[in-house]
Image (tube, rainbow, N blue to C red):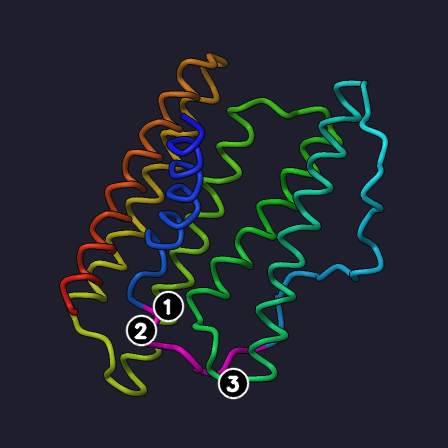
């Protein structure tokens, strides 16, 4: 069971990347404007391993959100450091994905501090960020198409459809959150996981078929 849970967790994370960034790996090494990038965290800000765990539910939720944000900030910093040392080592889609995770973690922290840590609210944050990331990936692909004609028309159409798909997913997440029913929120999460696993399987089969 632990192996299955681990696989599902990995699938959810990697599937998210596949959802919005499967084609724009072809943009690897393209220039990016520094404006709008999320903030990073200094390694010195990392807490000591021996840290008291809050017992108050609100304080625990805030502490968890803060730590989650620091982790993704360091993930982002690690990627940008590698990109600065080895130009072209990180694709635009990878940076877009991690930037999106940082923004989502920042939104989750704001919700936690405000005392709104319901599943529905968190799901809406995830869905909104998925829309924003899908739009960014599609715009980047359009630029690459114009500059180098390195992306097919079919792939551009696919990326555009993914934007619409994420918008529909956001509408579903908002509708589920409005019902204030944990079952509706869980149903949305299950659908997301199922779709992400399906896309991951497609990506894996496509990669192995090339060998």
Q: Which residue is mark 2?
A: 142
3 and 1 marks in contact (CB < 8 Å): no
1 and 2 marks in contact (CB < 8 Å): yes
**In the image, residue 98 above or below residue 81:** above
Residue 15 in percent (x, y) is at: 35, 47
Point out the image quarter for the N terminus: top left
Q: Secondary structure at mark 3?
A: loop
* Residue 139 tag number: 1
Q: Judge left or right: residue 180 versus residue 35.
A: left
Between 173 and 71, which is closer to the camera in this rendering? 71
Q: Crowding near pointer 2: few (<14 within 10 Å), some, many (20+)? A: some
* Residue 174 tag number: none
Q: Which residue is mark 3?
A: 87
Residue 28, magenta (yes or no): yes
Q: Judge left or right: residue 158 versus residue 170.
A: left
Mark 2 or mark 3, which is nearer the start of the sequence? 3
Residue segment shown in magenta: 24-33
Q: Judge left or right: residue 90 versus residue 149.
A: right
Q: State whether the magenta stretch is mostly helix, strand or loop.
A: loop
Between 204 and 171, which is closer to the camera in this rendering? 204
Label 3 and label 2: CA atoms lie apart by: 22 Å
Please tell me in which quadrant of the rendered image residue 12 appears. top left
Point 60% across, 72% down: residue: 80
Residue 38 in percent (x, y) is at: 65, 61
Residue 187 in percent (x, y) is at: 36, 21
Label 3 and label 1: CA atoms lie apart by: 21 Å
Between 177 and 20, which is closer to the camera in this rendering? 20
């Amino acid at each position: 069971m632990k192996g299955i849970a681990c696989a599902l967790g990995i699938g959810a994370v990697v599937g998210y990347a596949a959802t919005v960034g499967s084609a724009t790996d072809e943009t690897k090494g393209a220039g990016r404007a520094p404006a709008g990038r999320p903030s990073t965290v200094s390694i010195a800000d990392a807490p000591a391993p021996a840290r008291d765990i809050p017992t108050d539910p609100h304080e625990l939720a805030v502490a968890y959100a803060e730590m989650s944000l620091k982790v993704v900030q360091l993930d982002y910093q690690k990627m940008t450091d590698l990109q600065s040392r080895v130009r072209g080592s990180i694709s635009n889609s990878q940076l877009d994905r991690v930037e999106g995770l940082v923004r989502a973690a920042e939104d989750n922290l704001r919700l936690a501090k405000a005392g709104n840590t319901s599943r529905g609210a968190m799901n809406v944050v995830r869905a909104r960020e998925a829309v924003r990331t899908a739009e960014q990936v599609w715009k980047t692909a359009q630029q690459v198409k114009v500059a180098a004609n390195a992306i097919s028309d079919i792939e551009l159409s696919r990326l555009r459809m993914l934007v619409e798909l994420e918008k529909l997913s956001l509408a579903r997440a908002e509708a589920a959150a409005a019902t204030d029913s944990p079952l509706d929120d869980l149903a949305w999460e299950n659908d997301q996981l199922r779709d992400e696993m399906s896309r991951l399987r497609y990506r894996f089969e496509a990669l192995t078929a090339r060998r």
